[in-house]
């Protein structure tokens, strides 16, 4: 038995004796009732003490628990802040690294392209047919690496660009973007249908980039098909506008939809369809920087519909 | 016949220099190109001492300076700053040539007084065309107060 246990026992005993004495004096029980009175009082009192002590201990434990909880909440918040800071620092580091790598890589890649060109120009006679083919392979790879690098740099620019937000007549921007894509790819076999659309707010150049990428995909992934058509619609929904660009191209399997907007992700491997897998990542980055969302739905052989949101115009309703 | 037009090319990358010189040969640019691989060398040769003074050696002054940015020890920006600080070289057209097209890199060049920023680039053919084109513009088309009368051939 511990010291406090002994003390408690003594205390209880004392109280029981006192109570019994009190009962004897006040209630004046018959002599044969006295032991029962004593036992009863002792029992009741010990129960009472036990309960009191229990609640006291509980309260103390609770208070201690609360203190610990508050402390750990503080600690958690602090750790969270440290973690956040670390993550954003790492992200910045990584972005800076990508940024300088992509620029630094241009120099050696440039040397490969330049000197392979010189090799072909100055030493054509000394190269066998097979040798020329090897050089062509090297150049194709270097050109592809260059395109990937350019894609990274474009993404980087979209990430860093200062957004010059202005009212955008999305219909006219779309028409221009489509015309540019048509002439750049020298592919005029697709019909563009623009439905009446609400105006948006955003950076005109960046939004043009978004539309050009989406139209380029529509052109690319419908090549060789009948009655190629791309339709753009727009709806005002509260403070934002939702736009849809739907084509009737080859589509993709929805199982891969999560990969669609990833950097360097390509859902098509056929060499006839050019691309680096940067376009849709760029679209996503630009839309996100405008506070919007972008998603896609598709059905193989039926077509793809890409939807995105932009802040609605504050001038026109 | 007038004295040949002198230009200075500053670059630590031998490959880039080779490509530039080859383009100049190929396109028979009417210029004498002096190459420096190092910032110290070129500043000494031009008589720029970094404090805004320079020894009087005007016969060595080039008609244009083509400058790379990323070089060990003294980089392109520092060379540019010193060229602009010296009265002797203040008005010589300086054309930056770099693989970097980082906006902040380009901005710094113009802030320091570069006349032009040319991105080194790779093309399917015609390596070094960027250098040849820039030389033609800055030597044959661009006019400075000191470059004498533009003579029609």
Image: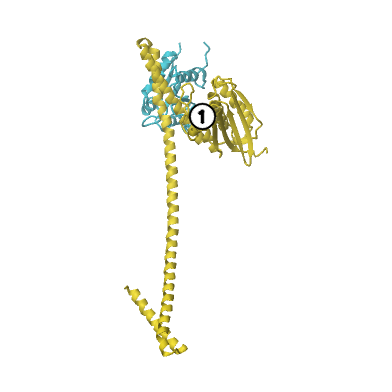
Chain colours: A yellow, B cyan
Q: Is A202 on the left or on the right of B39, as rendered?
A: right
**Point 42% across, 51% down: residue:** A79
Name the one closer to the observer, B17 or A179.
A179
Work out whether residue B16 can be spotted: no
Q: Residue furthest front?
A: A32
**Point 47% across, 88% down: residue:** A27
Q: Residues within 10 Å of mark 1 (few under 14, many from 20)?
A: many
Quarter assignment of residue A53: bottom left
A19 shown above or below A124: below
Residue B68 pos. (x, y %): 42, 26
- Helix, strand or loop at label 1? It is loop
Residue at label 1? A252
Q: Quadrant of the C terminus of chain A?
A: top right
Residue A274 pos. (x, y %): 48, 23
Residue A139 pos. (x, y %): 41, 20
Work out whether residue A37 can be spotted: yes
Name the one closer to the observer, A161 or B78.
A161
Name the one closer to the observer, A220 or B102.
A220
Q: Residue furthest left?
A: A1
Q: Quadrant of the N terminus of chain A?
A: bottom left
């Amino acid at each position: 038995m511990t010291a406090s246990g002994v003390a408690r026992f003594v205390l209880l005993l004392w109280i029981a004796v006192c109570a019994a004495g009190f009962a004897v004096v006040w209630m004046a029980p018959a002599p044969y009732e006295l032991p029962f009175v004593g036992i009863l009082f002792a029992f009741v009192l010990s129960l009472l003490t036990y309960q009191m002590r229990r609640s006291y201990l509980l309260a103390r434990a609770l208070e201690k628990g609360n203190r610990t909880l508050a402390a750990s909440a503080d600690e958690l918040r602090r750790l969270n802040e440290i973690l956040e800071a670390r993550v954003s620092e790492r992200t910045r580091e990584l972005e800076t690294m990508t940024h300088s790598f992509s620029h630094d890589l241009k120099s050696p890649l440039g040397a490969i392209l330049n000197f392979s060109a010189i090799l072909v120009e100055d030493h054509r006679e000394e190269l066998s047919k097979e040798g020329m083919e090897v050089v062509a392979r090297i150049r194709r790879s270097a050109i592809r690496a260059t395109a990937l690098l350019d894609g990274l740099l474009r993404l980087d620019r979209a990430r860093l660009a200062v957004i010059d937000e202005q009212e955008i007549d999305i219909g006219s921007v779309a028409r221009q973007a489509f015309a540019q894509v048509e002439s750049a790819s020298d592919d005029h076999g697709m019909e563009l249908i623009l439905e009446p659309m609400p105006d948006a707010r955003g950076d005109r150049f960046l939004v043009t980039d978004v539309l050009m990428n989406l139209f380029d995909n529509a052109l690319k992934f419908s090549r060789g098909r009948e009655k190629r058509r791309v339709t753009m619609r727009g709806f005002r929904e509260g403070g934002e506008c939702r736009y849809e660009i739907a084509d009737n191209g080859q589509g993709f399997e929805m199982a891969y939809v999560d990969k669609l907007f990833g950097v360097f992700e390509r859902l098509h491997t056929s060499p006839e369809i050019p691309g680096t897998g940067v376009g849709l990542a760029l679209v996503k980055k630009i839309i996100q920087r405008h506070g919007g969302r972008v998603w896609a739905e598709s059905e193989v052989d039926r077509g793809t519909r890409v939807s995105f949101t932009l802040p609605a115009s504050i001038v026109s309703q | 016949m007038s004295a040949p037009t002198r230009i200075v090319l500053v670059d630590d990358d031998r490959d880039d220099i080779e490509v530039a010189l080859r383009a100049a040969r190929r396109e028979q640019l009417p210029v004498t190109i002096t190459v420096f691989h190092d910032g110290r060398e070129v500043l000494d040769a031009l008589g720029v001492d970094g404090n805004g003074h320079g020894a009087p050696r005007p016969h060595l002054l080039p008609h244009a300076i083509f400058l790379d940015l990323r070089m060990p020890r003294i980089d392109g920006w520092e060379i540019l700053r010193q060229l602009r600080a010296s009265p002797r070289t203040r008005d010589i057209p300086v054309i930056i040539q770099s693989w970097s097209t980082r906006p902040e890199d380009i901005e710094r060049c113009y802030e320091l007084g570069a006349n032009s920023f040319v991105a080194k680039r790779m093309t399917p053919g015609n390596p070094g065309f960027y250098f040849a084109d820039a030389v033609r513009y800055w030597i044959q088309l661009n006019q400075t107060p000191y470059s004498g009368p533009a003579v029609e051939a």
